[in-house]
Amino acid sequence: MSWVAALRTPLILLIAVGSCAACTHFENPIEGKDGVELDDAILGNWRMERPEGRMDLSIVGEGGSGMLMAEINEHGKDPEDLSGRVLTAKIESHNFLSLRETGASADGWRFFRYEISGDRFRLYPDADKFWMNAIKNKVVTGRIEKEKGVEYAVVTASGEELYNVVRGYSAVIFSDEMIYELVRVPDDDEKSAR
């Protein structure tokens, strides 16, 4: 899998659910105790660099949710622009991010547990296998679908139902292995990098 494909699978970066046939599709974002919100700590410009290239993200507040704009620059290829809607939820002592790609290919939400520490924004993926089992065992509302020989979960639960499931099972839903670490980019650095 290429670097860009790996980025597109969960984070988009976060958002392109449609490019991951085996990924869980969520019809609703995770809600916190008081509904959906946007954590101001994730707003701003972020960057991730890898040997294969660089990804620049900008997250801005927009009407109670966030808008994520990303530019992926893979060496030797044309830049790729992606965008998505971002919501956050705090449940117990953990922070969760719900992300949905915007545009014609939008196909559900992706979930991440996240941490902000200093100028670092770390994202941890959800476990697709958990959701498959949760649907089969009727822990959460949803269905199992199959496309091109690959089974995947479609979680149809409401935000409130997701809150209860995540609150009860967050230790096993989200990996302890970080998938992305982004570094905050001061506004002046972002302008000069483009």
Image: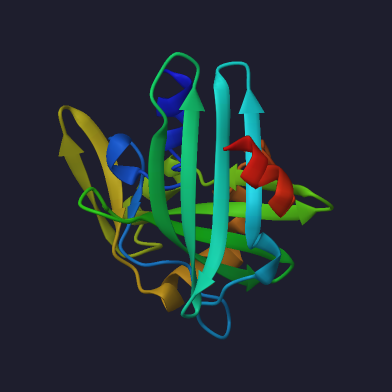
Q: Is residue 139 above or below residue 24?
A: below
The part of the image, by quadrant, that contains residue 41 is bottom right
Furthest-front residue in this view: 192
The x and y percentages for residue 98 are 48, 60
Do we see residue 111 in this rendering? yes
Residue at the image position 55 percent from the left and 17 percent from the top: 52
The quarter of the image holding the C terminus is top right
Q: Is residue 155 above or below residue 81?
A: below
Residue at the image position 62 percent from the left and 16 percent from the top: 51
The quarter of the image holding the N terminus is top left
Left or right of 185, for residue 180: left
The x and y percentages for residue 115 are 72, 54
Residue at the image position 40 percent from the left and 19 percent from the top: 77
The part of the image, by quadrant, that contains residue 37 is bottom right
Number of marks drawn: 0
Do we see residue 179 in this rendering? no
Look at the image and name its color scheme.
rainbow
Q: Between 2 and 62, which is closer to the camera in this rendering?
A: 62
